[in-house]
Image (cartoon, helix red, strand yellow):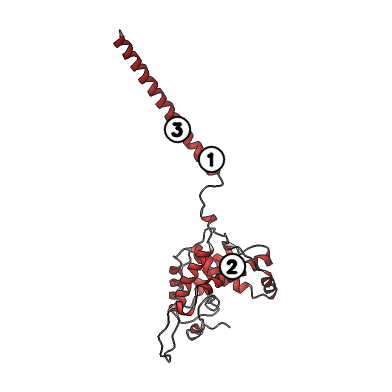
Amino acid sequence: MKRKLSTKLDFFNLRALIGLLLCAATVYFILIPIRSGLAFLNPRAPATASQRTLRFEERVFYQRAIEEVYWRHRIWPKERSDLKPSLDAVISQAQIEKKVRNYLRNSQALADYSQRPLTTEQLQAEMDRMAQNTRQPEVLQELFEALGNDPFVIAECLARPILAERLLAHPAVERVKQQSRTFDQTVAVGVDYTLPAISDPSGGCIGDTWTPTNLTGAPDAEFLTRQCGLAAK
């Protein structure tokens, strides 16, 4: 009698366990889509490409990479007996940081003047202009590669300084520049960009290219005056 009772109890316990497992599985599969939907609506969801930013330290890192390319292509005068020094010998970390602060401050001055920051469309257009009009496609290609061929980084660290400097040439904007002392070190403008294809101009130099303006932040721009007449006019 006791054995039969024990068997019945074991049977009921097994049925209860199976029932609990089925209930747990049902609840699990119901909650998965609900949690997914809530995560979609949650403003703390992981950052997308449109929310991407660059920290000041990252900008300094990429600025140094740009300096390396410029310095590598600098023509060292043949009449000089000394060897071409390393980049560290001609520009310090503090100078690189200052250049980053300067172009961020220029961007802020433009935003103060126009009541809006440089747009994604403007930065994309500047990248396209560089790629289409460059007199030195091999140098521009090296710059792109130094920035990881990342369109966002190229827009922020190469196109932004050039475009900001050119737009700041207007006297009215220059007055605002003198008043712009603070700036955002991150500048969140990370909407999707497209990496432009670099054209290969035939027949030597072409006019009105990006080269005179892209020397912002170069250790020494004099070497470009000897290459296809690249001096800024």
Residue 27's spot in the image, x, y percent? 46, 30
The residue under label 3 is 28
Nearer the observer: mark 2 or 1; the answer is 2
Q: Sequence order check: which comes first, mark 2 or mark 1? A: 1
The answer to which of marks 2 and 3 sits earlier in the sequence is: 3
Query: Which numbered circle lies on residue 104?
Result: 2
Q: What is the CA distance from the residue labelled 1 to the residue labelled 3?
A: 15 Å
Quadrant placement of the N terminus: top left
Q: What crowding class fits label 2: few (fewer than 14 Cα within 10 Å), some (14-19), or many (20 or more)? A: many
**What kind of residue is marked 1?**
Leu
Residue 13 vs 49, above or below: the answer is above
Residue that sits furthest to the bottom in the current view: 79
Q: Can you name the residue that lies furthest to the top here? A: 1
Tell which of 80 and 212 is nearer to you. 80
Question: For the point 53% across and 57% down, which residue is it?
Answer: 52
**Residue at mark 1:** 38
Residue 222 in view here: yes
Callout 2: SS = helix
Element marked by disc 3: helix
Marked residue nearer the N-terminal end (1 or 3): 3
Q: Quadrant of the C terminus?
A: bottom right
- For label 1, the SS is helix
Compared to residue 228, the image places residue 181 above or below, namely above
Tell me, yes or no, if residue 198 can be seen here: no
